[in-house]
Amino acid sequence: MEKIKMFSHNDLDGVSPAILGMLAFEEKEFDYDTVGIGRIDETVTHFLDEHNDKNTEIYITDISVSDEVAHRLNELVEQGQKVTLIDHHISALPLSEKYEWVHVTPEDSSGTKTAATSLFYEYLIQQNLLTRTKALDEYVELVRLFDTWDWFREKNEKAKRLNHLYYLINHEEFKDMVYEKLKASYEEDELFTFNERHEILLEAEEKKIEKYIQDKQKQMITASVTIAEEEYVAGIVFAENYQSELGNALCLEHEDIDFSVLIDMGRQKIGFRAVKDQINLADIAGHLGGGGHPKASGCSLTHETFKLFVVSQLFNEKK
């Protein structure tokens, strides 16, 4: 039996290609790992060290690898092994220029922002590994809408609710639920829907988010910050939960800020959100050792970023 190994990111746009893989490769030996950005190199390297099976096809989606790991994977490709990396992050473009097996597409030919899920879906269809259904089309689009933040522009609340559900329930439960619905769609040909239990959970969660945003609005610090010799007005707040919703709400409520800064002390991470067209957070976060999308990016909480967003603001004697 042919073996397939997938590595993907551990968010909604990362686990969804794995679900598509479960559908496309159900007649094969399919296995996957979803990991955070900081663990991808270690995870891939460990797999390569432990498995010397040239018949295993390797897929990497919604996440990129270092030059060192890419070089090692390329050696396998040169030996005849199939390796495919599919990503939509701009930061992965240099790898795509170096290796033919790396495919990075931030936008499609019509200018629509892509997601790893939508790119992998089209790949599977083109390879005749998967057939379209209404539910598949809708699910993939919901993931794309949320991951690119196009859901906000198109006012698609269902996309936002799908992401909420991913973090509300056990990831295995989410994966199994989506897989069963998408598999059943080949017979029922219906759109993707939530069940009654999930609807109840989502309604309760939405009330919690509303209260959380109201509380955090009062805690935000407005500050001028300089990044790569450019000065910005940032709305800074400590937030461990609901960063996307909170960050977006802060930007809409406070038109004077260029972007919001959401500091998660426990995870030692910082999230950035923006709504203004002229702000590119991928570039801004890139100067701080991070990356992401133009309107939603992030970086690690380092000595530099802690000083920039916390020490210089909270302990500013002029305030």
Image (tube, grey):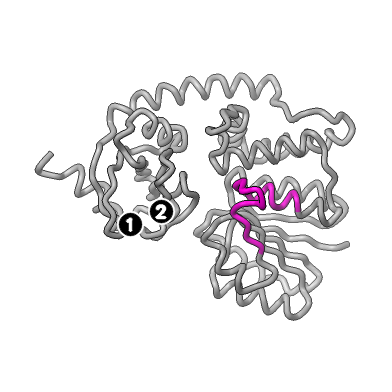
Give the number of callouts: 2
Does 126 sit left or right of 248 as displayed?
A: right
Quarter-of-image position of residue 317:
top left
Q: Residue visible at 53% across and 60% down?
A: 39
Q: Nearer the viewer, residue 184 or 283?
A: 283
Q: Is residue 311 above or below residue 154?
A: below
Residue behind mark 1 = 302
Rendered location of residue 256, percent (x, y): 29, 35
Residue of label 2: 299
Residue beneath the point at 77% across and 73% down: 81
Secondary structure type for disc 1: loop
Q: Which residues are magenta?
A: 103-122
- Displayed quadrant of residue 4: bottom right
Q: Position of residue 187 (x, y in %)?
A: 89, 32
Q: Nearer the viewer, residue 50 or 263?
A: 263
In the image, is 216 to the left or to the right of 151?
left
Residue at 34%, 25% (x, y): give it.
Answer: 215
The amino acid beneath tag 2 is: Cys
What residue appears at the point 83 percent right and 57 percent down from the top-left corner? 127
Q: Which kind of residue does numbered mark 1 sit on?
A: Thr
SS class of the residue under badge 2?
strand
Q: Note whether residue 105 is visible.
A: yes
87 vs 221, left or right, is right
Disc 2 and disc 1 in contact, CB within 8 angstroms = yes
Residue 117 on the magenta segment: yes
Screen quadrant of the C terminus = top left
Q: Position of residue 173 (x, y in %)?
A: 68, 36
Circle 2 crowding by C-alpha within 10 Å: few under 14, some 14–19, many from 20 = many
Q: In this image, 184 relative to 73: left or right?
A: right
